[in-house]
Image (cartoon, rainbow, N blue to C red):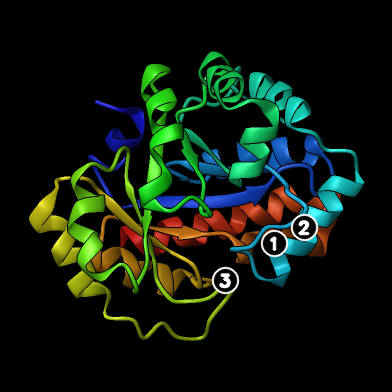
Amino acid sequence: MSKIKEAFSDKKAFIPFITCGDPDLETTKKCVIEMVKNGASIIELGIPFSDPTAEGPVIQEANMRALSAGTTTDKIFDMVVELRKEVSIPLAFMTYANVVYSYGSERFIKKCSEIGMDGLILPDVPYEEKEEFSEICEKYEIDLISLIAPTSNDRIAKIAGDAKGFLYIVSSLGVTGMRSEINTDLESMVALVRENSDIPCAIGFGISKPEQAAKMAAISDGAIIGSAIVKIVAEYGKDAPEHVGEFVRSVREALDR
């Protein structure tokens, strides 16, 4: 059983996201350690990219800051090697096809496996085109996480059927960011997944408060939060780790209530 899938076995999963290298990789590393201490189940590590199409302004700006600070894929790999001395929970990279391509897909995915990564999320790769990545991921035992959106409709059953790790349910159309309310009929999306697979599913995009996370986790197996955390890092810079830890703890408590 994959480590990612296992992370859902005893309670609702909380999956925080952070952009690596904003403001620097040392701060990212400290934030990850605080997230683990405060109850994160799986952590998504964003590899910065110059044209992050799925992201709203908060994460776009974090990508720019990270790239300006000289963050590279290799430096992020080195940080993960350091992290793995202290952190045992599953880690997944979230990035764009271009980042993987330009590194060399096989070289990138093999490296993920060597440094102890568990999953890979590529939001700009449609289900129909994932084959070229999924075969390499299987070879190196990396879960290629599939996403389903409110527009996936008749494809949901098919995507759920061969999903790995967990299924990332995109709560609303558009880019990532904080929303005051989420109006998508997520219950029926989750029901359709359940009919076709035993894969755990977590809801992301637009969740910014502990109460919202608890609501989303109540209808699925977990909640994903990105922009709200990236915003804390933007506000506090190198002093962010403690504040990120507090936020993660507040979400974990809401999910466990």
Q: Secondary structure at mark 3?
A: loop
Give the CA separation, mark 3 to mark 1.
Answer: 10 Å
Q: Taking 63 as reference, is 45 left or right?
A: left
Q: Secondary structure at mark 1?
A: helix
Amino acid identity at mark 2: Ala
**Which residue is nearer to you in this view: 178 or 151?**
151
Q: Secondary structure at mark 2?
A: helix
**Which residue is nearer to you in this view: 200 or 232?**
200
Percent across and percent down for residue 115 are: 58, 17
Q: Nearer the viewer, mark 3 or mark 1?
A: 3
Amino acid identity at mark 1: Ile
**Which residue is nearer to you in this view: 169 or 252?**
169
Instruction: Give yes or no for contact between labels 1 and 2 (Cβ–Cβ under 8 Å).
Output: yes
Determine which residue is flagged by label 2.
62
Determine which residue is flagged by label 1.
59
Q: Pointer 3: residues within 10 angstroms few (<14), some, or many (20+)?
A: some
Q: Taking 28 as reference, is 65 left or right?
A: right
**Which residue lies at the image location 44% right of the left edge and 24% below the top edge?**
136
**Which residue lies at the image location 71% right of the left edge and 35% below the top edge?**
29
Percent across and percent down for residue 112 are: 55, 23
Identify the mark at residue 175; answer none if there is no mark.
Answer: 3
Give the CA separation, mark 1 to mark 2.
Answer: 5 Å
**Which residue lies at the image location 34% right of the left edge and 56% below the top edge?**
202
Of the residues under marks 3 and 1, which one precedes in the sequence? 1
Instruction: Give yes or no for contact between labels 3 and 1 (Cβ–Cβ under 8 Å).
Output: no
Percent across and percent down for residue 175 are: 57, 71
Give the CA separation, mark 2 to mark 3.
Answer: 15 Å
Amino acid identity at mark 3: Val
Q: Taking 13 as reference, is 9 left or right?
A: left
